Image: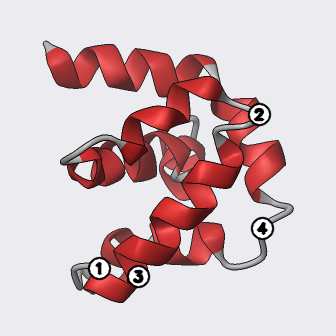
């Protein structure tokens, strides 16, 4: 139930998040590491993702959730929503 709330929240803001994240060169690459490789994020990668999300939260306030304690636990949900390949597969 909580996961579906965040999926809805991120989906509603998906285009804005994608548009703004394209301005941050490595953000999408970092976010998709577990999806593309099956390897978990390192502590340094999570730290960098949080830095980028802090910047993105200026444009998409819903992303401030990642700054809260344990906010990194929601990173896989965000990656799932923003996964462009999944979106293409769903429409084929």
Q: Cα distance, mark 4 to mark 1?
A: 18 Å
Say whether marks 2 and 4 touch (CB < 8 Å).
no
The CA distance from mark 3 to mark 4 is 14 Å
- Residue bearing the label numbered 2: 59
Considering only order in the chain, which callout, 4 or 3, is on the residue closer to the N terminus? Answer: 4
Examine the rendered structure and indicate whether residue 49 appears above or below residue 87: below
Residue 92: x percent and y percent?
Answer: 57, 41
Q: Residues within 10 Å of mark 3 (few under 14, many from 20)?
A: some
- For the residues labelled 1 and 3, say whether their Cβ atoms are less than 8 Å apart: yes
Which sits in the foreground, 37 or 53?
53
Read off the residue under disc 3. 45
Instruction: Decide which of tag 2 and tag 4 comes sooner along the chain.
Output: 4
- Please, what secondary structure does the residue beneath circle 1 have? loop
Q: How is the image coloured?
A: secondary structure
Query: Dot 1: within a 10 Å radius of its alpha carbon, few (fewer than 14), some, or many (20 or more) residues?
Result: some
Residue at 22% of width from left, 45% of height from top? 69
Say the numbered circle drawn on residue 41.
1
Rounded to the nearest whole Å, what is the CA distance between mark 1 and mark 2? 25 Å
Residue highlighted by disc 4: 24
Q: Give the left or right position of residue 65, taking residue 20 as reference.
A: left
- Separation of disc 1 and disc 3 at Cα? 6 Å
Q: CA distance from mark 2 to mark 3?
A: 22 Å
């Amino acid at each position: 139930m909580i996961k579906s709330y965040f999926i809805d929240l991120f989906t509603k803001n998906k285009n804005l998040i994608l548009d703004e994240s394209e301005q941050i060169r490595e953000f999408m690459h970092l976010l998709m590491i577990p999806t593309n490789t099956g390897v978990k994020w390192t502590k340094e990668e999570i730290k960098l993702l949080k830095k980028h999300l802090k910047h993105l939260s200026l444009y998409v306030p819903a992303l401030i959730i990642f700054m809260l304690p344990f906010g990194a636990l929601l990173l896989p949900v965000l990656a799932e929503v923003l996964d462009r390949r999944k979106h293409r597969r769903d429409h084929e």
